[in-house]
Amino acid sequence: MNPTDPITGDFEPDGTWYSMIAVRGDLYAVEPNHGELDKITTDGAISRVIDLSASQGHVVPTVVANHGVFQISNLGQFDPEQLNTQSVYQITPSGQVKVVATGLSKVLGLVFDGRDRMYVLETSYSTDDPGPEPGTGRLIRILPNGKQEILIDGTKGVLVVPTGMTFGPDGALYISNIGYGAPPVGAGQILKVEITD
């Protein structure tokens, strides 16, 4: 299955799979390079749910969540001019794409809490560096009304190239930190973020 809008200089025929979730007994995986969301059944059948490149171009979708319907967020390209230009897309049951959040940058994590609040993990938030800038990751909470709250600011240096997050059974967020690049071997971390309100 080839995407509608592949990029010519950076196309991987086998894909570069990044995120996967289980929903009602099936697996759903997102592939950033091709811009697709695929369904994988337990007997190994693979089918495309949506080719996001067909309607959005090369937005580099990186993470999929399910909150009643699929939500996909994107990395975009490492370009200072793309700061605050990434989105979260909702995929309707009929396969339509709807933008539900905008103004984001380099997203690698997306989860929801029990109060319908969306948490977005940005791996880097830099206006100067075209690549990922360690120490500039941010954690943003988006309320059901669309208001965005920055919970961890990119200027604090806490989130150093984070790569994903999930809610634990204790209600805290767990974030993988120092997830890529060339840090010393063994420097990776799991950060616990307690949500108190």
Image (tube, rainbow, N blue to C red):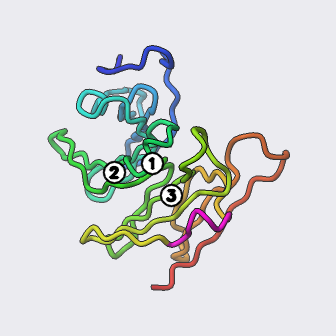
Q: Secondary structure at mark 2?
A: strand
- How would you rate the neighbour count of disc 3 (Cα within 10 Å): few for under 14, some for 14-19, many for 20 or more? many
Q: Provide residue 22's location: percent of width, then percent of height.
A: 42, 48
Q: Residue at x 67, y 65 (%)?
A: 158
- Disc number placed over residue 121 in the picture, else none: 3
**Mark 1 or 3, closer to the camera:** 1
Instruction: Locate the N terminus and report the quarter of the image it occupies.
Output: top left
Residue 135 among those drawn in magenta = no
| Residue pointed to by mark 2 | 88
- Disc number placed over residue 174 in the picture, else none: none
The residue under label 3 is which amino acid type? Leu
Q: Which residues are magenta?
A: 151-157
Q: Residue at x 64, y 51 (%)?
A: 161
| Residue pointed to by mark 1 | 83
Tell me the CA gap for discs 1 and 3: 14 Å
For marks 1 and 3, the one nearer the N-term is: 1
Is residue 41 positioned above or below 174 on the image? above
The residue under label 2 is which amino acid type? Val
Q: Is residue 179 left or right of residue 119?
A: right
The residue under label 1 is which amino acid type? Leu
Q: Is residue 192 left or right of residue 103?
A: right
Which secondary structure dominates the residues rendered in magenta? loop
Furthest residue in direction bottom, as rendered: 197
Q: Provide residue 162's location: percent of width, then percent of height.
A: 62, 53
